[in-house]
Image (tube, helix red, strand yellow):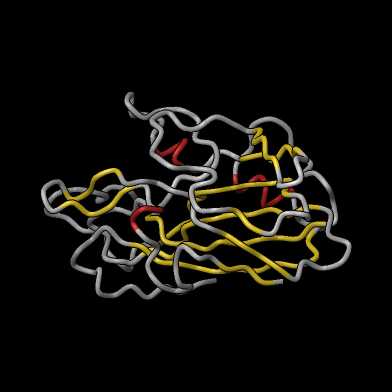
Amino acid sequence: MKIWSDSFIEGDMIPPRCAFAEMDPGSHIKLSSNRSPHIAWDDVPAGTQSLVLFMHDLDVPSDGSDVNQEGRTVPDALPRTDFYHWTLVDIPVCLKSFAEGKFSDMVTPGGKNGPLVPFTIKNGTEHQLRHGINDYTGWFANDPDMAGEYYGYDGPCPPWNDERVHTYIFTLYALDIPRLPLEGRFTGKEARLAITGHILDEAKIFGVYTLNPDVAGNLIGQPS
């Protein structure tokens, strides 16, 4: 199975239009277009009954004490953890791609609606895809202007003072079940656990992103 994007070159910088925020010389960062990237795939194995797509950041600081603090940096050596930006499940096998901007085309304070994602393919057939909540739900929990449940895609917004360039992995899984065995609200981590034992194949691509102008010349990611 293979996966690719026309929105960015694998291993290169994810374009700011597909990010939650972009650099701003006056205030470090500003909100960006937050467009979900084009994603396409092929060579799905026989017996596949549905597909699941994840996007996660490998490089989120495990300690947020220095994040976005003037006069301080988030050291590259700081232990890192995962941050889920997108979880889309129950993708029918008849689909082969998603256009850029299909699932997000702006920053939505409080988050986009979910989990159901009505989706009509070219022949008029309707499918019910589902979005999980992404980890901005927890990140903004104590921000009265932004708090809410963030379903679907919300793009990169790494700390503007991080010494590390962040790597974003897009992973597509082919499953032997037509519907993910989760109900209601679910997270990326919960969806990853739910597909255990049902994976027929998988494919990955990655892009990188930073909001730190001091390391913008080092846009080299390390996928895993």
Q: Nearer the viewer, residue 27 or 186?
A: 27
Residue plotted at (73% across, 37% down): 128
Q: Nearer the viewer, residue 217 or 198?
A: 217
**In terms of image quadrants, where is residue 55?**
bottom right
Q: Examine the rendered structure and indicate whether residue 145 appears above or below residue 8.
A: above
Residue at the far front: name it.
123
Q: Nearer the viewer, residue 99 or 124?
A: 124
Residue plotted at (48% across, 51% down): 83
Q: Examine the rendered structure and indicate whether residue 143 appears above or below residue 98.
A: above
Residue plotted at (64% across, 32% down): 185
User: 130 left or right of 159?
Assistant: right
User: 76 left or right of 5?
Assistant: left
**Image spot of residue 172 (x, y percent):** 66, 61
**Image spot of residue 108 (x, y percent):** 41, 33
User: 69 left or right of 194?
Assistant: left
Quadrant position of the N terminus in the picture: bottom right
Count up the numbered dots.
0
Residue plotted at (62% across, 68% down): 3
Residue at the far right: name it.
47
**Image spot of residue 194 (x, y percent):** 74, 48
Quadrant position of the C terminus in the picture: bottom right
**In terms of image quadrants, where is residue 97?**
bottom right
**Image spot of residue 211 (x, y percent):** 27, 58
Q: Nearer the viewer, residue 37 or 90?
A: 37
